[in-house]
Amino acid sequence: MRRWLGWTRSFYFRIAVTFVGFMVAAATPTTTSGATTTTASLAYNQDIKPILDSDCIVCHGARIHENSVRLDTYANVMRVVTAGNANSLLVRETRPGAAMYVNFSGDRASKSDQIRAWVVNNNAAESR
Ligand code: HEC
């Protein structure tokens, strides 16, 4: 009998826990339903600057700046970027097949994609 009582008690306890878990799970989508996109947003400071610093500023920094293009600060980068515009010079020069594409180290396609997405989809945001 005591065993039976213990079992029912834990059974109800589990139902209670499950119910609370369900309430939390049910509440979560409601609070995030306003979001329009699930893709992570890209920002200059967090995502783009590391790429430019490792692959581009040797030729586009303060000392050497080929074609007067400097990619060492956000303000300088924005001289070759129009937020939201896929025809920005930075996007055109870093597309697969374009002149600067070969300067990417490692995963070129992914870096090229990130730059384009940052300019076009994230309006060239400085930070997030
Ligand atoms: C080894 C040196 C070197 C590296 C590294 C380099 N560039 Fe360049 N870049 C140049 C030279 C030289 C030019 C000018 C000649 C040309 O347009 O091809 C130039 C031109 C540019 C231009 C301007 C093109 C125009 O039509 O005015 C952009 C934008 C650019 N580079 C972006 C980048 C990006 C982004 C990276 C990093 C992925 C990068 N560059 C890496 C040497 C380099």
Image (cartoon, rainbow, N blue to C red):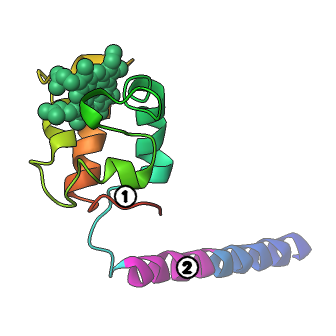
Residue at the image position 63 percent from the left and 78 percent from the top? 15
Q: Tell me residue 45's x, y (percent).
A: 49, 51
Question: Residue 121, relative to residue 5: is it above or below?
Answer: above
- Is residue 110 in view? no
- Give the quadrant of ligand 1: top left
Q: Which element is circle 1 on?
A: loop
Q: Earlier in the sequence, mark 1 or mark 2?
A: 2
- Of the pair 24 and 33, the residue shown nearer to us: 33
Residue 41: mark: 1
Q: Quadrant of residue 105?
A: top left
Q: Tell me if 114 is positioned left or right of 86 in this view.
A: right
Task: Look at mark 2 in the image and give the residue it sits on.
Answer: 24
Q: Tell me if 8 is positioned left or right of 79 in this view.
A: right
Label 2, ligand 1: CB separation under 8 Å: no
- Of the pair 54 and 117, the residue shown nearer to us: 54
* Residue type of the residue flagged with mark 1: Ser
Q: Tell me residue 83's x, y (percent).
A: 22, 60
Q: Tell me if 18 is positioned left or right of 106 in this view.
A: right
* Residue type of the residue flagged with mark 2: Val
